[in-house]
Amino acid sequence: MTMFLKPRLLVFAVLSVVLLSLRLVAQTPPVAQAPPAAPMQHKPGMQHTPDMQHDAGPMSTQGGQAAFAAISEIVKLLEADPKTDWSKVNLEALRQHLADMDMVMLRSRVRAREVANGLVMDVTGDASVAAAIKRMVVPHATMLDAMPAWSATTAAIAGGVRLTVTAKSAGDESRVAKIRGLGFAGLLVQGDHHTEHHLMLAKGARVH
């Protein structure tokens, strides 16, 4: 009889210890955890220190949307130039020009066809886009025409402008191939005058 009681007592003792341990665990208050850190808010007067940049890791070089970044760059140039006449600065003119660039580059319709020695492009859009096309494409064609590689002309058409670009040297097959490869978008970005043009606009100069 004693041999049967001892294992039962042993099991009973083990179960009692386990139950007591579980009860103690259940009654122990949970360790408080710190709430997740809130994202840093940009507050007025907040200074960006080198330590903040280090903690944040690598920083992006673009200050947001493309037009925002372009205007930010021009403002820094103006602030760095002690000769800037702030009474003449006109950043709104630059903003309007960047809006024109956006409409012409992204919202215009382009129908291109190959012609001898180059390319003809009919660039059209709705009323607001058509107005931007005329403001952008006509003066840019003048800049293209002044370059040594190609000739450029424009003509008004319904809803926009017809741009014709050809190689200045007849039979220059590599130049013709480049014109056709660039197409309207590629030809629109030709030349190194864009940044200078934006700076002149911001300074209040009359351009185009």
Image (spheres, grey):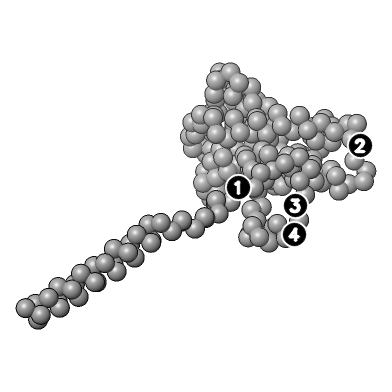
Residue kind at label 4, given as amino acid type: Pro
| Residue located at (68% from left, 39% from top) | 68
In front of the other: 89 or 206: 89
Mark number, residue 48: 3
**Which quadrant would the C terminus be assigned to in this image?**
top right
Mark 2 and mark 4: span between their CA atoms? 31 Å
Q: Is residue 154 left or right of residue 44?
A: left
* 84 up-or-down from 173: above or below: above
| Residue located at (58% from left, 51% from top) | 37
Mark 2 and mark 1: span between their CA atoms? 39 Å
**Which quadrant would the N terminus be assigned to in this image?**
bottom left
Dot 4: element: helix
Q: Are marks 4 and 3 in contact (CB under 8 Å)?
A: no
Residue kind at label 3, given as amino acid type: His
* 59 up-or-down from 44: above or below: below
Instruction: Point out the tag, 2 or 3, that comes first from the N-terminus.
Output: 3
Where residue 88 appears, x then y in whole percent?
88, 31
Mark number, residue 50: 4
Q: Are marks 2 and 3 in contact (CB under 8 Å)?
A: no
The answer to whether residue 44 is seen in the rendering is yes
Is label 2 or label 3 in front? 3
Where residue 202 appears, x then y in whole percent?
80, 35
Residue kind at label 1, given as amino acid type: Pro
Q: Are marks 2 and 4 in contact (CB under 8 Å)?
A: no
Instruction: Point out the tag, 4 or 1, that comes first from the N-terminus.
Output: 1
According to the picture, the residue beneath numbered tag 2 turns out to be 85
According to the picture, the residue beneath numbered tag 1 turns out to be 39
Dot 3: element: loop
Mark 4 and mark 1: span between their CA atoms? 18 Å
Dot 2: element: loop
Is label 1 or label 3 in front? 1
Where residue 30 appears, x then y in whole percent?
46, 56
